[in-house]
Image (cartoon, rainbow, N blue to C red):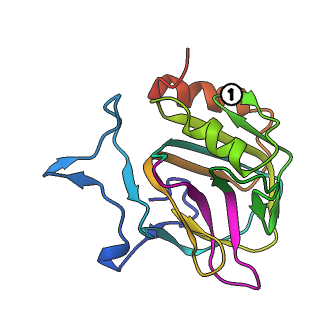
Amino acid sequence: VDQSGNASNLVQVTEADQPQIVVNGALYVDTNGNPGIYFDGSGQHLDFASGVAVTDGHVFIVYKMDTTDTTQSFAGSGTGASGTYLLLMQDGSTTAEVYREMSVDSDYINGAVQSLANRNEYFDAIGAGTDAKLFGIDGLTTSENLAEIGIGGLNDTFSLKGHFSEFIIYSSDQVSNQTNIEANINSHYGLWV
């Protein structure tokens, strides 16, 4: 549910496409006991009630990847000439295009700026270890609206497999607030020391 008051809520009316929030009768939690949702890599996704356009914005995502699915995308749109994706992570791929129909200034993992060169390096960095990571993007500008999270690419080709705890989109520049936002997220989820 959108907590900003902008009514950019996420919905999924098709039961088979709904990610899990309950497992065996209990609320789904990560290894630190934080609630979240689990995408199983089968195409489960949540749709924005209306597309989200961003100009020079910020994104913060708390995610623990299940690396048994070797090609994943956080968000995108399956429509348009080529589809869009917000970060395509792909094991073994040396393809440099990790964002489609959008541009970014920088991206971060656990508060540290990254200079990753291809899909495989993003897959390895975000999938490493046993703990969730905070992935951040600054300077995000979309040329096609984001329509869904949990899936991206033309015809919704690339699905997530893992635990999502947080997905925050700011449609404005947050560089001056970034350190505080990351510190608050880290304090809540206990992601790094």
Residue 87 lies in quadrant: bottom right
Q: From what the image shows, is residue 107 above or below residue 143? A: above
Q: Quadrant of residue 133?
A: top right
Q: Is residue 120 left or right of residue 118?
A: left
Q: Position of residue 167 (x, y in %)?
A: 54, 50
Please name the residue shown 33% across and 42% down the image.
35
Query: Which kind of residue does numbered mark 1 sit on?
Result: Gly
| Left or right of residue 24, residue 95 in this image | right
The answer to whether 193 is drawn above or below residue 48 in the figure is above
Crowd rating for badge 1 (residues with CA inside 10 Å; few <14, some 14–19, many 20+): some
Q: Residue at x 37, y 53 (%)?
A: 38
Q: Toward the viewer: 128 or 139?
A: 128
Q: Which residue is pictured at 59% across the width and 36% down the height?
A: 134
Q: Is residue 117 above or below residue 53?
A: above
Q: Which residues are magenta?
A: 68-87
Q: Which residue is mark 1?
A: 111
> Residue 1 appears at what percent x and percent y?
44, 59
Which quadrant is the C terminus positioned in?
Answer: top right
The spot of residue 12 in percent (x, y) is 40, 74
Q: How many numbered callouts?
A: 1
Q: Quadrant of residue 44?
A: bottom left
Above-or-below relation of 88 to 52? above
Q: Residue furthest top?
A: 193
The kind of secondary structure element at disc 1 is loop
